[in-house]
Amino acid sequence: MPKPALIYRTRLPIRLWHWTNACALFVMLMSGMMIFNAHPRLYWGAFGANPDHAWLEIGNHGTSGYLTVAGITIPTTGVLGYAMGTDEAFPPLVTIPTHYGLAIAREWHFAFAWVLAAGWLIFALYAIVSRHLWRDLLLTYEEMKPAHLWQDIKDHARLRLPRGEAARHYNPLQKLAYLGVLGLGIPAMILSGLAMSPAMDAAWPWLLTLFDGRQSARSVHFICAAGLALFIVVHLAMVILAGPFNELRSMITGWYRMPPERPGAEDAA
């Protein structure tokens, strides 16, 4: 049986952005959790302080941690609120720095925010100029059909990942996920982050109007960060399921070995 073909699937600009973005996101998520520890409550509107009603709160009652979302309280001892012997919202294992340090966390966060924003802008321009957006990311007319999307969802739920020629390109769920991150998640996180800056609010007052207040911007920022964290978890799970060596080789060298067709696939076609 012939060895599956080795193809050049991932171009250099895409690989560079992928690893730069991954590094920036991890640092920003970890430093952001430390910043959140300074006031582990979220509000909607322009104002927010301890006496105000928070739609999300992470805290503790002594050694019992809890998460409250929209009035629903969930015990989180050992994970959030109280874990690893500390009473911070997020434990030191996942924060930068590992000890309470708001000033240091803000320095890390702001430094890598520029890396994230600049990388996103350069990649967006590249995707447009090189036609990567139209060639690889936008769904085709056939892929947008509900029946096609539903079949792709069922295949992923059954862990029937694309093989053979189908693995050469992104599948519809991948495209939707990447477009969501590139076109919505990262831009919303950047804009909401800018809206929390008094200096940027003075220069661009429309930011506060856009988010209906600085506290709403903080909530949007947290939701976007949580969404990106979830994307990373799912992304890593898919890499493991699809074959980590082959996927990592593609994102490091650009070369990808096509997984063989499933037995009987050619007969079925």
Image: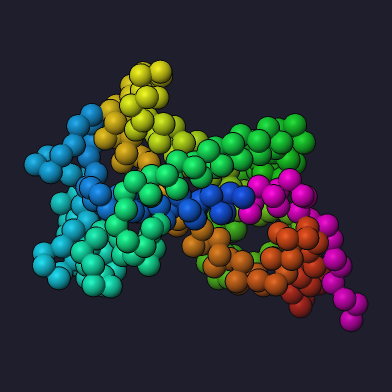
Instruction: Give yes or no for residue 188 being in the magenta stretch.
Output: no
Task: Work out whether residue 66 or residue 204 is closer to the camera in this orientation and state it.
Answer: 204
Seen in the image, is 36 located left or right of residue 259?
Answer: left
* Residue sitting at x 56%, y 42%: 115
Q: Quadrant of residue 9?
A: bottom right
Q: Quadrant of residue 98?
A: bottom left
Q: Position of residue 139 (x, y in %)?
A: 65, 43
Residue that protrudes farthest toward the right in the picture: 2
- Residue span colored magenta: 1-19
Q: Is residue 148 visible?
A: no
Task: Work out whether residue 55 or residue 50 is closer to the camera in this orientation and state it.
Answer: 50
The colour scheme applied to this rendered structure is rainbow
Task: Work out whether residue 66 or residue 269 is closer to the camera in this orientation and state it.
Answer: 66
Seen in the image, is 176 located left or right of residue 41?
Answer: right
Seen in the image, is 10 located left or right of residue 91?
Answer: right
Residue that protrudes farthest toward the bottom in the picture: 1
Q: Position of residue 96 (x, y in %)?
A: 40, 57
* Residue sitting at x 32%, y 53%: 101
Q: Quadrant of the N terminus?
A: bottom right
Q: Is residue 133 above or below residue 62?
A: above
How many numbered marks does the figure carry?
0
Residue that protrudes farthest toward the left in the picture: 51
Q: Quadrant of the C terminus?
A: bottom right
Q: Position of residue 145 (x, y in %)?
A: 61, 45
* Residue sitting at x 26%, y 70%: 83
* Residue sitting at x 78%, y 58%: 254
Q: Is residue 115 above or below residue 264?
A: above
Q: Is residue 112 visible?
A: yes
Q: Position of residue 253 (x, y in %)?
A: 78, 60
Seen in the image, is 227 located left or right of residue 157?
Answer: left
